[in-house]
Image (spheres, rainbow, N blue to C red):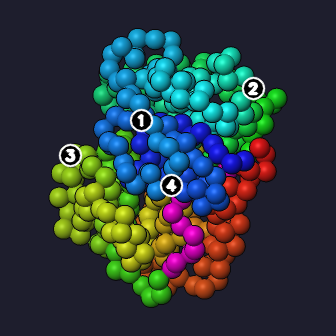
């Protein structure tokens, strides 16, 4: 393969949240392997990024059609708002394979014009499950109704995947679901692409616990609130909470505690240092969907990693973390681990699993082998 078209649901730079991290580092890997990337991305606030020109043979931007007009449809909003005639015209200018990043970008997948093209879909989630989970934790009734409606539409729309030649599931859990639902399709498990190449664990001990994530997303806001209210309200150990665009309610809650600090919108460098210098990277979720990139980043760059079981569900990462669901036992685990240096044995165990199952090179080779 000499070239590929990649359709991205968002502008994949800066690579500062889950989905676009996967897209950006996939682009970099293809570029480093000498494959010309023709990038097509939907822009709705991140702007055109000249950095992408360093890795892409061509970059085309399309305005995402947000607003009520894209909601009044049987097609999911995340798909309808990304329909662009210009994209179709640009794809017809070559005959290279097409990689659709997420169900979001799949409106052309069943178009007869592309019947003979090799079509790949990257499944970032089981989208209807993801939206149903968002509905469960949403307190705003209008937003909750939107999430439920979108979940139904996505469930119906998902069958468009039958038109793909190859689908890339992001976790074992997702792979098992897709393979069972679409037994005649080719699915392979390809974990997230990411910025990590080697395991870098700092020697010694840190003096704080870190929780990080996009703090404008309900799932992460709720996780941070759980950690504060159920764990650190009664644990007098320094806790740092870091991430993008923190929610106002979360800011107010953090301000009540002298031993809890908020780091708003840290740079990539600052985030890496926070993970590396922490004694414990603490991660918690109520949504066992996809693969959490923040977990991978913590394991590649941090010392101890404490998680609940939903964080590692459908992955091979349970043996690289300390896993606990019971709240009281979780407190005890944090207190005990805060004074212990991570052992060489634990680091070696991490290396064997992460470099085997979660390296970008392995992911690239899996894709190329199937094309």
Q: Earlier in the sequence, mark 1 or mark 2?
A: 1
Q: Are marks 1 and 2 in contact (CB under 8 Å)?
A: no
Residue that mark 3 sits on: 248
Residue depicted at 31% across the width and 63% down the height: 267
Q: Earlier in the sequence, mark 3 or mark 4?
A: 4
**Residue 98 highlighted magenta (yes or no):** no
Q: Residue 326 in the image: state x and y as whole percent.
A: 51, 57
Q: Earlier in the sequence, mark 2 or mark 4?
A: 4
Label 2 – label 4 distance at C-alpha: 27 Å
Helix or strand or loop: what does disc 3 sit on?
A: helix
How many neighbours does mark 4 have within 10 angstroms: few (below 14), some (14-19), or many (20 or more)?
A: many
Left or right? Give the position of 304 relative to 222.
right
Quadrant of the snapshot with the C terminus: top right
User: Which label sits in the foreground, 3 or 4?
Assistant: 4
Residue depicted at 37% across the width and 73% down the height: 273
Which mark, by number, is residue 61? 1
């Amino acid at each position: 393969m000499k070239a590929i078209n990649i359709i991205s649901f968002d502008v994949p730079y800066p690579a500062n949240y889950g989905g676009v991290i996967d897209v950006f580092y996939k682009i970099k890997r293809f570029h480093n392997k000498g494959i010309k990337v023709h990038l097509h991305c939907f822009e709705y606030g991140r702007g055109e990024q000249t950095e992408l020109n360093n890795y892409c043979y061509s970059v085309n931007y399309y305005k995402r059609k947000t607003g009520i007009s894209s909601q009044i449809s049987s097609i999911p909003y995340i798909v309808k708002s990304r329909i662009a005639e210009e994209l179709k015209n640009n794809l017809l200018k070559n005959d290279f394979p097409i990689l659709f990043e997420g169900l979001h970008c799949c409106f052309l997948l069943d178009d007869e014009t592309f019947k003979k093209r090799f079509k790949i879909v990257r499944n970032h989630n089981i989208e209807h499950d993801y939206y149903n989970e968002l509905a469960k934790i949403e307190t705003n009734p209008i937003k909750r109704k939107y999430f439920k409606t979108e979940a139904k539409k996505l469930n119906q729309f998902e069958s468009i995947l039958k038109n793909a030649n190859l689908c890339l599931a992001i976790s074992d859990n997702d792979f098992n679901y897709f393979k069972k639902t679409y037994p005649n399709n080719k699915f392979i498990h390809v974990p997230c692409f990411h910025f990590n190449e080697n395991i870098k664990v700092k020697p010694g001990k840190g003096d704080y616990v870190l929780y990080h994530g996009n703090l404008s997303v309900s799932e992460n806001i709720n996780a941070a609130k759980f950690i504060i209210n159920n764990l650190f309200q009664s644990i007098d150990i320094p806790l740092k909470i870091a991430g993008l665009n923190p929610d106002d309610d979360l800011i107010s809650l953090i301000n009540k505690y002298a031993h809890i600090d908020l780091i708003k919108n840290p740079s990539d460098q600052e985030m890496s240092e926070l993970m590396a210098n922490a004694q414990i990277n603490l991660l918690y979720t109520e949504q066992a969907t996809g693969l959490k990139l923040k977990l991978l980043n913590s394991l590649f760059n941090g010392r101890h990693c404490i998680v609940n079981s939903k964080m590692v569900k459908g992955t091979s990462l349970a043996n690289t973390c300390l896993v606990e669901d019971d709240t009281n036992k979780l407190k005890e685990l944090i207190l005990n681990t805060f004074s212990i240096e991570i052992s060489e044995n634990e680091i070696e165990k991490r290396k064997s699993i992460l470099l085997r199952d979660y390296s970008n090179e392995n992911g690239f080779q899996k894709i190329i082998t199937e094309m």
